[in-house]
Amino acid sequence: MQATLTVCIAGATGWTGRALVPAVLAAPDLALGSAVSRSAAGRDLGDALGGDTLGVPAHASVRDALDGVDVLIDYTSETAVKANALAAIDAGVAVVIGSSGLTAADFADIDAAARERSVGVVASGNFSLTAAMCSAAALLAARHLPQWEVIDYASAGKPDVPSGTARELAERLGEVREPAIGRPIDEIHGPREARGAGVAGTRVHSVRLPSFVVSTEVVFGLPDERLTIRHDAGATPEPYVAGTLLAARKVPGRTGLTRGLDALLLEAG
């Protein structure tokens, strides 16, 4: 019988964290040991969420919440997530990163720290199962199609650009190969910003408008044909729950950083 893993959720009173709490509580192989929420610090998490008392303490910082914890799940913010992950790694606690905003350099630092401590980290710009399939398909296409660009759609108020989903996709596409560009950026006429930002060699265009949550589109082009692979997220956090819990179950057996939920889904067995 599989041993129970004790989980801490950082950002437990946030948008995704609120959906994860009942899911962890309902899972027979997971236990919710603690939570991190600055607004609820010092209170019982259930009380802070407006429900029944859960016997789960909410702390102000990750360092205060790691006693007896096997896995930290982080859904906080781009300003807090790296420090949270490094604190958990330093304590020997495995990490699942769902927060966006980290750069390739940030992930390199996290990977180095995790390997030094022989700790596992799984990070994904999007823990939706269908988004993972979108990434897997795009990475396969990039092996055979030399030119692509990424379009990143999100709500008008989203502060980070590109989204974590789009940034991760561009960086992982860059690991396959650098895409060909029809005309070099320094040879175009007009504002270079119109050609998007360069992320690991991929041109990424961020659209920020009302009605979008997070949508990510990668367009591959060949003469006289195109392939578009796109993922659209709805207005609730429910699509991210199953993938996050899958990562929480698998991360304790790993060492170093694994990027992308699809990397877990495509593993044999």
Image (cartoon, rainbow, N blue to C red):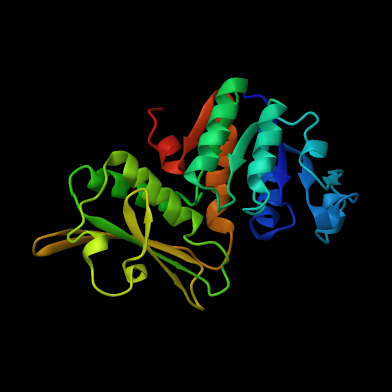
In the image shown, does 131 or 167 lie closer to the viewer?
Answer: 167
Q: Nearer the viewer, residue 21 or 226?
A: 226
Q: How many marks?
A: 0
Give the image location of residue 92, x and y in percent.
Answer: 69, 25
Q: Residue furthest left?
A: 224
Considering every residue shown, the one lying at the far right of the view is 42
Which of the two residues, 205 or 166, is positioned nearer the viewer here? 205
Is residue 236 at all visible to an observer of this figure?
yes
**Residue 4 at least partly seen:** no
Dividing the image into 4 quarters, which one contains the N terminus? Answer: top right
Image quadrant where one finds the C terminus: top left
Quarter occupied by residue 47: bottom right
Residue 67 shown left or right of residue 1 in the figure: right
Question: Residue 25, percent across and down?
Answer: 72, 44
Task: Give left or right: position of 37 versus 120.
Answer: right
Residue at 29% from the left image edge and 59% from the top image edge:
149
Kindly identify the residue that appears in the image at 66 percent across and 35 percent down: 86
Residue at screen point 41% across, 37% down: 263
Q: Give above or below for 82 relative to 148.
A: above
Q: Position of residue 81 (x, y in %)?
A: 65, 46
65 to 142, vertically: above or below: above
Find residue 236 and report its image quarter.
bottom right
